[in-house]
Amino acid sequence: QVQLQESGPGLVKPSQTLSLTCTVSGGSITTSGYAWSWIRQPPGKGREWMGAISYDGDAYYSPILKSRTSMTRDTIKNQFSLHLSSVTPKDTAVYYCARVSGDFYTDWDEYDYWGQGTQVTVSA
């Protein structure tokens, strides 16, 4: 059973960089055929795919957020991280990490494991 757990600050000030880490257990982030995504859901809105890092370390980003987003991974710790720069209150959301088959990043049916989500609020 693969488990994912998000961690990071719950409150970030505007203009700062938000950094979140997803710790994976029960499976390796280097397992072929899978990618690991960050997805967020602002209050009252739908899910938004932010980016993914593949099993071989390639990163892919939403065109909308690409200029502010980067993802890294630590294969020893079996973790992957999200870094979102220049945050504004519009970045307030519940942030999820999840596993997806192949490169179907925006097909929610292709996601099989999700973290519980972590609330991030951007406020001064």
Image (cartoon, helix red, strand yellow):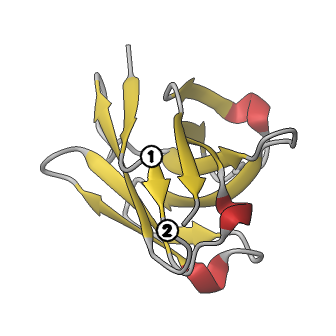
Residue corresponding to mark 1: 10
**Kind of residue at badge 1:** Gly
**Kind of residue at badge 2:** Lys
Instruction: Find the residue positioned furthest to the bottom.
Output: 67
Element marked by disc 1:
loop
Residue name at image x 54 percent, y 66 percent: 124
Q: Residues within 10 Å of mark 2 (few under 14, many from 20)?
A: some
Instruction: Find the residue positioned furthest to the top.
Output: 1
Residue name at image x 76 percent, y 51 percent: 48
Q: 2 above or below 95?
A: above
Q: Is residue 97 visible?
A: no
* Residue 95 location, quadrant: top right
- In the rendered structure, the answer to whether residue 44 lies left or right of residue 7 reads right
Q: Residues within 10 Å of mark 1 (few under 14, many from 20)?
A: some
Q: CA distance from mark 1 to mark 2?
A: 10 Å
Rendering coords of residue 87 (x, y %)? 58, 73
Residue name at image x 38 percent, y 22 percent: 3
- In the rendered structure, the answer to whether residue 27 lies left or right of residue 33 reads left
Q: 79 above or below 27?
A: below
Instruction: Find the residue positioned furthest to the front.
Output: 124
Residue corresponding to mark 2: 13
Residue name at image x 75 percent, y 47 percent: 42
Nearer the observer, 46 or 111: 46
Element marked by disc 2:
loop
Rendering coords of residue 27 (x, y %)? 31, 29
Nearer the observer, 102 or 78: 78
Nearer the observer, 22 or 14: 14
